[in-house]
Image: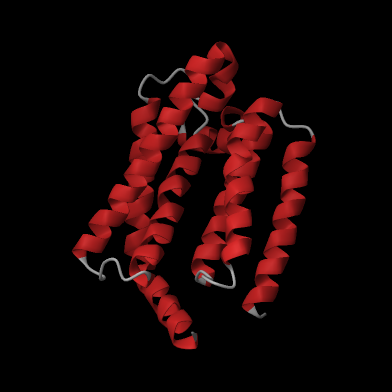
Amino acid sequence: MHRTQFLLVALFVLLGLLAWSGWHPYDRGTWLMEVLPIFIVVPVLIASYTRFPLTQLLYICIFVHAVILLVGGAYTYARVPFGFQIAEALGLHRNPYDKIGHFAQGFVPALAAREILLRGGYVRAGKMLSFLVTCVVLAISASYELIEWAAAVAFGQGADEFLGTQGDPWDTQSDMLFALIGAVVAQALLARTQDRQINRLQNAA
């Protein structure tokens, strides 16, 4: 399947999932805050497709991350059924689905930052690239935690579903840790694949 066709199919699937997620979410306000990044990123990707198309690897990862957000928005992260299944299988005392979300919050932005830095010629592949990508991910993760803090201050108890701490006093720190792990794993597993796809894009251009 041609990449454009693949992306169109992915877009229609994503729109269908968006409709499902927003039909009867557990909490409408929480749903909106959780899926807001999709409403921002997807139009940007569509607008930039002709001028700055991304690698197919990155598009796929963004799609998967969007699905994670949509599921979390529909149920709230603390109530996702799949998370309860994981908790039961691993003997955990809390629903860990939010950690999947924060892992993706490190995994996908790491690949996005890496691609932009490489293709823009801002830095060459190597240790400095890995360091800068990891710093970008941690900055994004910290910014998201500040947004959660601002929501808690603004909405009080009404922000509990969005925060999803589930009584964990170290939730903020563990969220950032999972984002860091996601960034490291993404670079370790997919850097070479991404490099090959970047080279194909540049050669085609």
On screen, residue 16 versus residue 49, left or right, reads right
Identify whether 126 is placed above or below 25. Answer: below
Q: Position of residue 193 (x, y in %)?
A: 41, 73
Residue at image location 60% in from the left, 33% down from the top: 33
Q: Position of residue 158 (x, y in %)?
A: 60, 16
- Location of residue 119 (image quadrant): bottom left
Q: Position of residue 181 (x, y in %)?
A: 34, 47
Residue at image location 57% in from the left, 32% down from the top: 77
Q: Nearer the viewer, residue 147 or 193?
A: 147
Identify whether 194 is placed above or below 24. Answer: below
Identify whether 8 is placed above or below 93. Answer: below
- Location of residue 198 (image quadrant): bottom left
Q: Position of residue 112 (x, y in %)?
A: 43, 59
Q: Nearer the viewer, residue 50 or 83?
A: 50
Q: Residue furthest top?
A: 157
Q: Nearer the viewer, residue 38 or 57?
A: 38
Residue at image location 56% in from the left, 20% down from the top: 159
Identify whether 182 is placed above or below 31. Answer: below
Q: Is residue 188 visible?
A: yes
On screen, residue 186 versus residue 60, left or right, reads left
Residue at image location 49% in from the left, 87% down from the top: 204
